[in-house]
Image: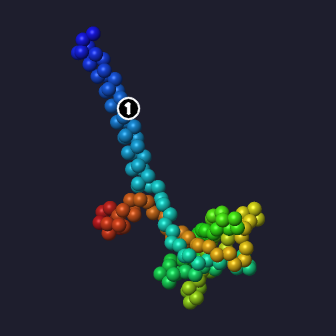
């Protein structure tokens, strides 16, 4: 068997392998572009001080720069370490914003099964959902543009 014959046998296999590798790369690139342009990410702003009240609501001390961004019905997450050291996250919604006191009151969205470990006075952190943006919007904001045409 000569070297030229062996090389000619290997060459078509390498071309097929190259085409398969290029196809996989193109598919991964296409999926990344779709994610970059269309898949939204949620932007949260957190406040470190939130306490459960006896009536079941949560009162959160909110930074003055965050207060104007809050609205009634806005989604939020209540992050807390419950008894036993387990980290829990509960869905909540803003029910009242007190600009003068710098507080926001939230309603928890939990069932009885989820409420284990929660008690009056328990403190945690609130993450307010501010907006949803795509990665391309974040990049444009970072470079100081608000749209592609600018």
Task: Say which quadrant the C terminus sits in.
Answer: bottom left
Q: Residue at x 39, y 50 (%)?
A: 33
How did the renderer colour the structure? Answer: rainbow
Please state the horizontal and vertical placement of residue 44, each as a whole percent of the image.
51, 68
Image quadrant containing the N terminus = top left
The quarter of the displayed image where residue 112 is located: bottom right
**For residue 46, side relative to residue 138 (left or right):** right
Residue sitting nearer the eye, 114 or 82: 82
Q: Position of residue 126 (x, y in %)?
A: 58, 72
At 32% across and 69% down in the image, what residue appears?
A: 144
The residue positioned farthest toward the right in the image shown: 112
Label 1 sits on residue:
20
Tell me: 146 left or right of 92.
left
Above/below status of 126 relative to 3: below
Query: Percent from the top left, x then y, of residue 111?
Result: 74, 64
Q: Quadrant of residue 119?
A: bottom right
Instruction: Please indicate, yes or no, whether residue 95 appears anywhere in the rendered image.
Output: no
Report the residue at 61% width, 68% height from top.
79
* Helix, strand or loop under label 1: helix
117 with respect to 146 (left or right): right
Determine the residue located farthest toward the bottom in the rendered image. 100
Of 149 and 87, the residue lying toward us = 87
Q: Residues within 10 Å of mark 1 (few under 14, many from 20)?
A: few
Residue 45: image x %, image y %? Answer: 51, 72
Whether residue 37 is situated above or below residue 14 in the rendered picture: below
Q: Residue furthest top?
A: 1
């Amino acid at each position: 068997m000569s070297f030229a014959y062996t090389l000619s046998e290997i060459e078509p296999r390498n071309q097929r392998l190259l085409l398969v590798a290029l196809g996989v790369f193109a598919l991964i690139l296409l999926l990344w572009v779709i994610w970059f342009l269309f898949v939204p990410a949620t932007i949260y702003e957190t406040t470190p001080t939130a306490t459960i009240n006896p009536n079941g609501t949560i009162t959160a001390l909110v930074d003055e720069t965050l207060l104007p961004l809050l609205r009634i019905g806005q989604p939020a997450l209540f992050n807390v370490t419950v008894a036993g050291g387990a980290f829990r996250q509960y869905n909540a919604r803003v029910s009242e914003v007190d600009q003068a006191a710098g507080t926001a009151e939230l309603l928890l969205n939990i069932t009885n099964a989820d409420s284990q470990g929660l008690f009056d006075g328990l403190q945690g952190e609130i993450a307010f959902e501010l907006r949803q943006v795509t990665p391309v919007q974040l990049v444009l904001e970072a470079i100081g543009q608000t749209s592609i045409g600018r």
